[in-house]
Amino acid sequence: MSNATTSTGQQSNKSIAERCDDIAVRFERVSKRFNAVNALCDVSLAVRRGEFMTLLGPSGCGKTTLLNLAAGFFSPDDGQIFIAESLVNGVPTYKREIGMMFQNYALFPHLTVMANVAYGLRARHLAKLEITRRVEAALNLVKLSGLEDRKPRQLSGGQQQRVALARALVINPKVLLLDEPFSALDKHLRASMQIELREIQRNLGLTTIFVTHDQGEALSLSDRVAVISEGRIRQIGTPDAIYTHPCERFVASFVGDANILRGRLVSISGSQATIALGAVEVTVPSDPLLGTEPSALVDLFIRPEQLRLTDLGKACATSGAIVSHVYQGGHIDLHVECADSVRGRLLIRLSGSQAKIGWRIGARIAVSVNGSEAIAFAAA
């Protein structure tokens, strides 16, 4: 794997800073502690102007803390934060020229839509005519024209979210900060709002930092994703790079579904490593295995859609017995009990004609692996 797709957060952003002067937000070796808990540890991150950057990670990993540091709700214990190349350590939130959209929207229940959206402009003491013009433009942008006089309780969840977005956009922020804004919406409305938000963001060319623990959101919305765990950035890259070329075990297991098959390293030659897996050998990128001795046990991470069924009796990577099958509309998920799986089971995702087969519980199947789409790490 190339350095461009496998670099850690620190390495990736150092190269970005060196070759790109157009940085909107920059964190330099930022740390934050809450009593004895290290929420963030020596984090460096550069967000380009107009970029949609997602901070992805499990609950408690530090992603929301990083967003709150950018907003000015917290101050870093160590390190520096820049917005548009201006140091903002110690600068209050209202002077940072940011727009923020919260998980619960934080609308004023006693104010109308118009008044909610206008709140930030009034706090900035703009002229009445200018406030009216900008609020009308913001409401038109989020498709809420005609609802100016309604109260939040008279709106649907999606409309409330649009009001919160309009309020964040109307001040013409340098950076838009989004803290899991879709978590309260149902699946279909969430998908619709994701598309609308991305269209607005692209049309405005607005630098956006988005926090989520939902991998689907991160992969579908982002220009780049920063995967965070235990207060550290584990990998930064495009959604495709994060999904297909994870640089470490945590990223491989956290982003998307992954099977883990136990194999043995045969050899490393240049950029390729050969892994013995069952009765076959597969070839994978060698970078994650550099320094691993031949014959050592390795864990092969492979996506459910990259496993294939083959005939019993033929040489195969592994085999097992079907314990369940789950119809998912466009595909079917087979859960297979498998001794070679680190977790004891495999998830195989089948589409097309194979999804229409009536798979029998208890039936034994043989499985092959597309090694070019897998990645291996030294066994844990």
Image (cartoon, rainbow, N blue to C red):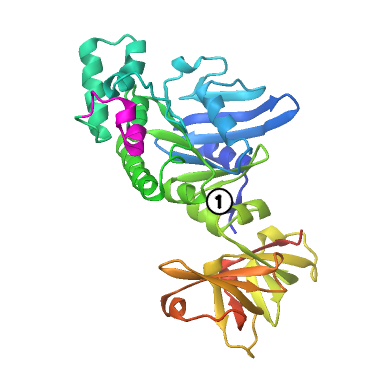
The magenta span reads 147-162
Secondary structure at numbered mark 1: helix
Q: Nearer the viewer, residue 80 or 94?
A: 94
Image spot of residue 78 (x, y percent): 67, 23
Q: Which quarter of the rendered picture does the C terminus lie within?
A: bottom right
Image spot of residue 64 (x, y percent): 56, 33
17 within the magenta span:
no
Which residue in the protein does label 1 denote?
Answer: 4
How many numbered badges does the structure rendering display? 1
- Residue 136 vs 351, above or below: the answer is above
Q: Would residue 341 appear left or right of 225 to someone viewing this image? A: right
- Residue 93 vs 330, above or below: the answer is above
Residue type, numbered disc 1: Ala
Q: Would residue 132 appear left or right of 105 to someone viewing this image? A: left
Quarter holding residue 328: bottom left
Residue at coordinates 23% horizontally, 29% vertically from top-left?
147
The residue furthest front is 153
Q: Nearer the viewer, residue 156 or 234?
A: 156
Q: Is residue 134 visible?
A: yes
Image spot of residue 26 (x, y percent): 53, 30
Image spot of residue 268 (x, y percent): 71, 68
Q: Is residue 271 visible?
A: no
160 within the magenta span:
yes
Q: Residues within 10 Å of mark 1 (few under 14, many from 20)?
A: some
